[in-house]
Amino acid sequence: MSIQAEPFSPVQQTAKAEVINRPSTTLWQDARRRFRMNPLAMGGLFVLILIILYALLGPFLSHFNYYSNDLHATLIPPSWAHPFGTDELGRDILTRTMYGTRISLVIGFGSVLINLTIGIFYGGISGYFGGRIDNFMQRLIDIIFSIPDLLYVILLMVTLGAGLKNIFIVLGLVNWVPMARIVRGQILALREQEFVLAARTLGASTRRILMKHLLPNSIGQIIVVAALQVPAAIFMEAFLSFIGLGIQPPLVSLGYMAAEGRVDIPAYPFALFFPAVLIAILMLAFNFVGDGLRDAFDPKMRK
């Protein structure tokens, strides 16, 4: 007597088909797929690549440099010889925007690197140990967070003085707080998971648990916050240079060029227009990429 297996119901067949047909993907593969499906994020990434190439390769293709004066060619409107025109000292604005974009990008990425170092270290320790240590460290963050960032930055720049090195120091001291809070929240959510308890049982050190288990599982949120902090740092540098507390000659940044161009707005608006437009494009592109990364790493967006 043979026993015949009961046929699968339509619901069971559909579930089985989904299990068989859906490929297995990792977090990074799934995030990359969702990022590619976001047209604004891909457009922002494409624009960023073009701007980076413009800043890195453009100066090698230009016939001018960013610092030489030509008093016989001052404030020339855009032309074939000078596509963006010249400033009040006869310097080619196109070439200066190339170097200025380079400095602005270096400040953006460099300050975020400092923020990552401080924020991950501070937030990781606070979230992992918890208790009184976490309470004490969070009260310090509350004190820092209660001071407006703009006031904090201006006071530090006035104290330390203008210059590229001091901009790195100031932006690093100011913008690490959001990163620390994000890391702390992620660590608090993960530290009681089974894989962390297993690592503790096996005798893993605190450093190994943080570096090998907790932080790698928080990397998605860290990348999103870092991507959104780059345009904030670029804008802050532009503001500081605009009020005379940022980049100093002979270096040039987009904010410094905007500060120079504002003097000639009525008669020569192009001196301000081009660096200001580049700042706006950089801000939009980074924000589009950051929003795309946030959606890509959000598990609720998974389809």
Image (spheres, rainbow, N blue to C red):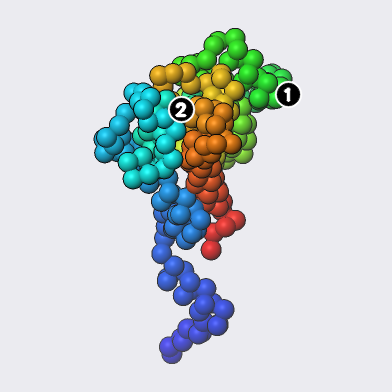
The image's mark for residue 88 is 2
Question: At which x and y percent is residue 206?
Answer: 50, 24
Q: Quick one: label 1, few (<14), some, or many (20+) residues within 10 Å?
A: few
Residue at x 47% of width, y 83% of height = 5
Residue at x 29% of width, y 36% of height = 62
Q: Splitting the image into 4 quarters, where does residue 53 fall?
A: top left
Callout 2 secondary element: loop
Q: CA distance from mark 2 to mark 1?
A: 42 Å
Question: At which x and y percent is residue 106?
Answer: 42, 29
Is 193 situated above or below 43? above
**136 and 242: which one is in front?**
242
Residue at x 53% of width, y 49% of height = 288
Amino acid type of the residue that numbered disc 1 sits on in the rendered structure: Ser
Q: Splitting the image into 4 quarters, where does residue 57 fall?
A: top left
Residue 181 visible to an observer of this rendering: yes
Q: Splitting the image into 4 quarters, where does residue 64 fall?
A: top left
Which residue bears the numbered disc 1?
A: 146
